[in-house]
Image (cartoon, grey):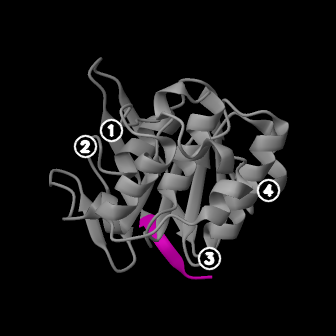
Amino acid sequence: MSHVLHSTELTVDLDNGKRLIFPELHLNKGELVLLQGASGSGKSTWMHAIAGLIPLASGSVHIEGQGSLQSGKKAPKQWRRNGLSFMPQRAFFWNSLSLKGNLDLAAWCKGLHVADADLDTLGLADKTSQAAHSLSLGEQQRVSALRSFLGNAPVLLADEPTASLDDSNAEALMTLFKEHAGDRAILVSSHDQRLAPFVDRILHLA
């Protein structure tokens, strides 16, 4: 396998004066990796740092064909559009739009089309006209996942994607992750032990 993402040791300074240090990371094409660690170990912070959502005190992140994110510098242009896709723990939606409207708007921004087959796979085919704000937390999480698949970003970061899902929907979501891996690398941060059978390897953050 070839590396699609490589980050050096990264350090992040928090507002409370605490400094977090994250180890070197390699993600390979086509693999699904589970990131585990105790609460407070910094799993979400590490993902936000890789995504360029919080500044790096030191270190760098390189994505194949997309350049590098360097400490002390702004993220490269289109880093979070063409370089990686980020699925946050709490989904954001335009509440005035339906489920399909939210997906169509996100797809339109990228010049893409939402596949109805994916909606059916996640059990959402009968929810397309429902207002996004009226969906259950689990349904919102599944919509967020589907939105994160849009485009050809070589890296997908997902923060606690199955936190609000029952066993059946968690399995459907993880199966969809596997199906969408292709040439991209997927890093999932989660406490959920149900995910282990679906991943290629597990990273433990002390």
Q: Give the residues drawn in magenta, as a range.
A: 1-6
Secondary structure state at the residue bearing disc 4: helix
Vertical relation: 30 (above or below) 15: below
Do the CB atoms of the residues marked 3 and 4 lie less than 8 Å apart? no
Residue under label 3: 182
| Cα gap from disc 3 to disc 4, whole angstroms | 15 Å
Question: Which of the two labelled residues, at mark 3 and mark 1, occupies the earlier sequence position?
Answer: 1
Do the CB atoms of the residues marked 4 and 1 lie less than 8 Å apart? no
Secondary structure state at the residue bearing disc 2: loop
Residue beneath the point at 48% across and 74% down: 4
Which kind of residue does numbered mark 1 sit on? Val
Give the camera-side residue of 46 and 133: 133
Residue under label 2: 57
Residue under label 4: 198
Residue under label 1: 12
- Residue 97 lies, in percent from the top left, at 39, 39
| Cα gap from disc 4 to disc 2, whole angstroms | 34 Å
- Residue 152 lies, in percent from the top left, at 44, 73
Question: Which of the two labelled residues, at mark 2 and mark 3, occupies the earlier sequence position?
Answer: 2
Which kind of residue does numbered mark 4 sit on? Phe
Vertical relation: 89 (above or below) 108: above
Vertical relation: 89 (above or below) 1: above
Which kind of residue does numbered mark 2 sit on? Ala
Do the CB atoms of the residues marked 1 and 2 lie less than 8 Å apart? yes
Q: Is residue 202 left or right of residue 144?
A: right
Do the CB atoms of the residues marked 4 and 2 lie less than 8 Å apart? no
Which kind of residue does numbered mark 3 sit on? Gly
Q: Main secondary structure of the magenta part?
A: strand
**Number of callouts:** 4
Residue beneath the point at 29% across and 61% down: 109
| Cα gap from disc 4 to disc 1, whole angstroms | 30 Å
